[in-house]
Image (spheres, helix red, strand yellow):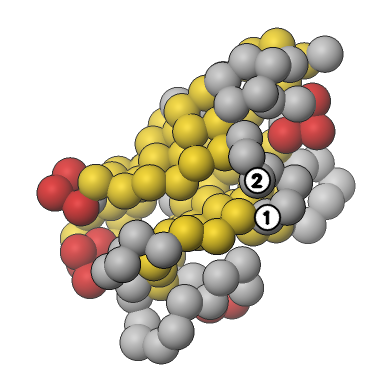
Amino acid sequence: QVKMVESGGGSVQAGGSLRLTCVGSGAFFSRRCMGWFRQAPGKEREGVARIFSLTGDTAYDDSVKGRFTISQDKAKNTLYLQMNRLKPEDTATYYCAAQIQPGGCPDFEISGYDYWGQGTQVTVSS
């Protein structure tokens, strides 16, 4: 079993920054790919960034490239999302996700991730 807990969300003005943290426990050590997703009210959940744990290879959605940075601290079983130059359209609930099952990194395919955190709210005002 894997448990993940996000934190770091909050309310900021446009142009501000936030750093999201996702701490994993249980079988989290066997993670393969980890991702950050977000879901705004009335919209589908979408991928924001992902990292392949073994190599550190990262990928980003075009909407956040150059503004967001995903990183990991393996020793602390922790995943981060540094969000800079935030925009009102970044407002959403942000979720971390982990792929545990064998296979290639699912990138932003939601069904490819096995475990999810409970989410943390990010609100950006103009």
Badge 2 marks a residue whose secondary structure is: loop
* Left or right of 94 in this view: 28: left
Picture residue at 39% right of the left edge, 41% below the top: 80
Badge 1 marks a residue whose secondary structure is: loop
How far from the left and from the top, in percent, is residue 102? 35, 87
Position above or below: 30 against 95: below
Label 2 and label 1: CA atoms lie apart by 6 Å
Tell me the quarter of the picture where residue 68 sits.
Answer: top right
- Mark 2 in CB contact with mark 1 (< 8 angstroms): yes
Residue extending farthest left? 75
Picture residue at 44% right of the left edge, 84% below the top: 104
Picture residue at 72% right of the left edge, 21% below the top: 124
Q: Which mark is residue 65?
A: 2
**Residue at the spot of label 1:** 61
Tell me the quarter of the picture where residue 126 sits.
Answer: top right
Residue sitting nearer the eye, 8 or 50: 50
Circle 2 Cα neighbour tier, 10 Å, few/some/many (<14 / 14–19 / ≥20): few
Amino acid beneath label 1: Asp
